Image: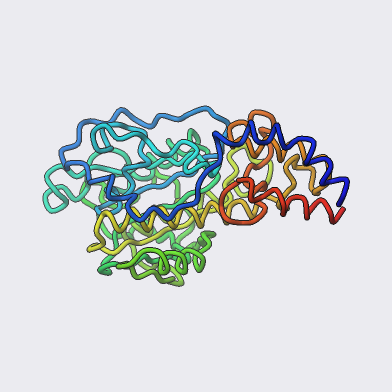
C-alpha cells in the first residue's frame, strides 16, 4: 500500500493539471429536457449522420413514432433534427467516455396522415432493414438501445427479447412490399434473441428519478410489427459481434417500448437516466475495474493509465486506444473523477 501511495503522490500535481478541466459532474439535472422542446414536424431535410473521430466507443439509439423520435433529438448530429441553435450533446456525453448518436424519422403532417415517416429508420420493413445494415458498419456501436412507441400510456417497458417471425407473419406496414421480403436479411422463423440491457437497474433508476413514468420488464415482445422488428435487429447485431476482438464488437443491445402518452420532456429525462445506467453496465463488462492498461490485472503498471483517464476520455484513448476508459470508474458512480483515486489506491494495496 505504501508504495502505491508514494507512486500516486508523485504524480498528483500532474493529475491536477490534467483533470480539472475535464472532470465530469454527476447531476440528475431534472430540467435537462426542458431545454429541448420538440422540433417542428416540418423539420428541414436531414444532412445525415456525422461521426466524430475522437477514439471513444459509440452508443447508437434509435426511435420511431413520437414520443420516441422527439425525445432523442439532443443526440442527433443533424442540426435540422434538433431545435434551432441547440448543439449536439452526444460527443463524450456527460464526460462518460461514449459518443451517443440518435437516428429517427420525421413525421411532417403528423402520424395520422404520415404513419411511415420520412428519413432514417422509417416505420417500414425495407427502410428499417436497409438503414440498419447500412448504418451499423459505419457507427460500430459498442452499445445499442432501440426505442419505439407502445400502447401503454406512460410505460417504460424493457423488452426481455424479440422474435423473428416467418415473413408472411409480420403485420403489414404502409408501403409495398408491406412485409419483409426475400431481399432482406432474415433469421429462421420464430428465432428468439435476448436483450442484454441492465433491465432491472434501468427500471429501478427510472422509477426513482423520473416521476410520471411506469417502468417495468416484459419477458419477450410478442408483437409482429416494426417495434419487434427493429428490437430484434439490435439483439441480432449484438449476437453477431459480441466476441472480444471483433472490430465491430457490441456488448449490449435491447429494446424499450415507451408509452404513447409519455410527454416528450419526461421521455427525454427517462432516456438520460437509462443511458447512464447502460453505460455504467457497459463499463462493468469490459474487464476488472482499475485494469487501465488492459493486461488482465490491476497493478502498478496501471498508475500511468489511471492518471491519463483522470485527464478525460479523449486523453486516455489517445494513449490507450485498445483499452476501456470506464474501468477508471473505481467507485462505480458512472464517472471518472478524483473520487476514484482512493479506491484505486485500495485496489493497488491488494497487490
**Does residue 7 lie above or below 236 as drawn?**
above
Q: How many marks?
A: 0
Who's the residue at 19% across and 45% down the image? 107
Q: Nearer the viewer, residue 161 or 323?
A: 323
Pinpoint residue 148: horizontal percent, then vertical percent: 33, 56
Pinpoint residue 298: horizontal percent, then vertical percent: 80, 48
Pinpoint residue 329: horizontal percent, then vertical percent: 64, 50
Q: Is residue 81 left or right of residue 188?
A: left
Would you identify the image quadrant in which residue 3 lies?
top right
**Does residue 115 lie above or below 42 as drawn?**
below
Q: Is residue 296 left or right of residue 233?
A: right
Who's the residue at 28% across and 60% down the image? 171
**Does residue 103 lie above or below 67 as drawn?**
above
Q: Nearer the viewer, residue 209 or 180?
A: 209
Would you identify the image quadrant in which residue 266 lies?
bottom left
**Does residue 113 lie above or below 305 as drawn?**
below
Instruction: Look at the image and tell me whether residue 74 can be seen.
Output: yes
Instruction: Look at the image and tell me whether residue 169 can be seen.
Output: no
Pinpoint residue 43: horizontal percent, then vertical percent: 19, 36
Who's the residue at 27% across and 43% down the image? 105
Q: Nearer the viewer, residue 331 or 12?
A: 12
Amino acid at each position: 500500500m505504501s508504495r502505491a501511495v508514494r507512486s500516486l503522490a508523485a504524480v498528483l500535481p500532474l493529475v491536477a493539471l490534467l483533470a480539472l478541466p475535464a472532470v465530469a459532474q454527476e447531476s440528475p439535472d431534472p430540467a435537462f429536457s426542458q431545454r429541448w422542446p420538440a422540433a417542428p414536424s416540418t423539420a428541414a431535410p436531414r444532412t445525415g449522420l456525422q461521426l466524430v473521430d475522437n477514439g471513444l466507443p459509440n452508443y447508437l439509439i434509435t426511435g420511431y413514432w413520437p414520443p420516441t423520435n422527439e425525445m432523442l433529438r439532443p443526440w442527433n448530429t443533424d442540426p435540422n433534427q434538433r431545435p434551432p441553435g441547440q448543439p449536439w450533446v452526444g460527443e463524450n456525453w456527460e464526460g462518460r467516455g461514449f459518443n451517443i448518436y440518435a437516428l429517427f424519422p420525421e413525421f411532417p403532417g403528423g402520424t395520422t396522415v404520415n404513419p411511415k415517416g420520412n428519413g432514417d429508420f422509417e416505420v417500414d420493413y425495407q427502410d428499417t432493414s436497409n438503414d440498419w445494415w447500412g448504418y451499423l458498419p459505419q457507427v460500430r456501436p459498442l452499445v445499442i438501445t432501440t426505442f419505439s412507441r407502445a400502447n401503454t400510456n406512460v410505460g417504460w417497458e424493457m423488452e426481455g427479447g424479440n422474435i423473428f417471425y416467418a415473413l408472411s407473419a409480420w403485420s403489414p406496414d404502409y408501403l409495398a412490399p408491406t412485409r419483409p421480403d426475400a431481399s432482406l436479411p432474415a433469421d429462421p422463423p420464430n428465432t428468439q434473441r435476448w436483450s442484454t440491457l441492465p433491465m432491472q437497474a434501468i427500471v429501478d433508476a427510472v422509477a426513482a428519478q423520473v416521476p410520471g413514468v411506469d417502468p417495468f420488464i416484459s419477458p419477450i415482445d410478442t408483437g409482429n410489427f416494426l417495434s419487434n422488428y427493429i428490437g430484434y435487429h439490435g439483439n441480432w447485431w449484438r449476437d453477431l459481434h459480441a466476441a472480444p476482438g471483433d472490430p465491430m464488437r457490441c456488448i449490449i443491445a435491447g429494446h424499450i417500448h415507451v408509452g404513447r402518452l409519455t410527454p416528450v420532456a419526461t421521455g427525454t429525462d427517462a432516456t438520460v437516466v437509462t443511458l447512464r445506467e447502460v453505460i455504467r453496465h457497459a463499463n462493468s463488462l469490459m474487464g476488472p475495474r482499475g485494469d487501465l492498461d488492459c493486461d488482465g490485472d490491476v497493478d502498478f503498471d496501471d498508475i500511468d493509465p489511471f492518471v491519463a483517464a483522470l485527464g478525460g476520455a479523449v486523453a486516455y484513448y489517445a494513449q490507450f486506444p485498445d483499452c476501456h476508459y470506464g474501468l477508471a470508474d473505481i467507485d462505480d458512480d458512472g464517472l471518472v473523477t478524483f473520487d476514484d483515486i482512493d479506491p484505486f489506491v485500495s485496489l493497488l494495496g491488494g497487490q
